[in-house]
Image (cartoon, rainbow, N blue to C red):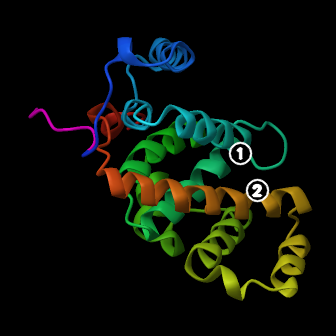
Amino acid sequence: MTEHAISRFPVPALDEMPEDIRDMIETVQEKSGFVPNVFLALAYRPDEFRAFFAAHDALMDKSEGLSKAEREMIVVATSAVNDCLYCVVAHGAILRIRAKNPLIADQVAVNPRKADLSDRERHMVDFALKMVNDSASVTDADIDAMRDKGFTTDEIWDIGAITAFFAMSNRLANLTSMRPNDEFYSMAR
């Protein structure tokens, strides 16, 4: 493989990073076997790195409400609309692992209307896509319809919050031209 830049902005060396950030990166590396490029690229701005990962973890690491696979499905579907290669590839890998389905991430990224989704997943993705495409048009009737489909108030909030957070994340990844790690492409295939 050809060596490509992780970001078009400076990427600090691990030994140049603040200790808390370095510790977080080393923990991720121990768990996954590699360092996802998002950690290295965002380390350029330590305060923003901390805020980003605090928000990310608050939304994505919950065990109540939406499943972790459902959370990743939202990320993949909305990141595809936002043309974010990094998030589609990285979170697609995580979705394949969490859903235990090697096909689902590609289906959701390319055409969620034809993806093999349950009714619940379809309603969730449709709502997330409405949020990503035209959040100003979301009405009380849309929220009520989600409740009628079995979603709790907190789950509806999480669908919207994950969509909103990754809209920011997608734009930051595109700004930096963040490159997905090669490892993500073959995970859970």
Q: Earlier in the sequence, mark 1 or mark 2?
A: 1
Q: Name the residue rendered at 49%, 72% in the picture.
A: 114
Give the CA distance from mark 1 to mark 2: 7 Å
Which segment is the magenta one? 1-7
Q: Is residue 18 above or below residue 60?
A: above
Tell me the amino acid under the disc marked 1: Leu
Tell me the amino acid under the disc marked 2: Asp
* Coordinates of residue 31 in the picture (x, y in percent): 51, 16
In front of the other: 90 or 14: 14
Q: Name the residue rendered at 28%, 42% in the picture.
A: 7
Identify the image quadrant of residue 57: top right
Q: How many numbered tags mark residues here?
A: 2
The answer to the question of whether label 1 and label 2 lie on touching residues, with beta carbons closer than 8 A, is: yes
Badge 1: few (under 14), some or many (20 or more) residues near its Cα, within 10 Å? some
* Coordinates of residue 158 in the picture (x, y in percent): 76, 56
In front of the other: 24 or 132: 24
Question: Is 3 in the magenta?
Answer: yes
What quarter of the picture does the N terminus occupy? top left
Image side of residue 24 versus residue 38, left or right: right
What quarter of the picture does the C terminus occupy? top left
Q: Secondary structure at mark 1?
A: helix
Badge 2: few (under 14), some or many (20 or more) residues near its Cα, within 10 Å? many
Q: Name the residue rendered at 12%, 32% in the picture.
A: 3
Q: Main secondary structure of the magenta part?
A: loop
Q: Secondary structure at mark 2?
A: helix
Q: Which residue is mark 1?
A: 59
Image side of residue 21 versus residue 154, left or right: left
* Coordinates of residue 8 in the picture (x, y in percent): 24, 46
Image side of residue 143 versus residue 130, left or right: right
In front of the other: 182 or 106: 182
* Coordinates of residue 73 in the picture (x, y in percent): 58, 54
Q: Which residue is mark 2?
A: 158
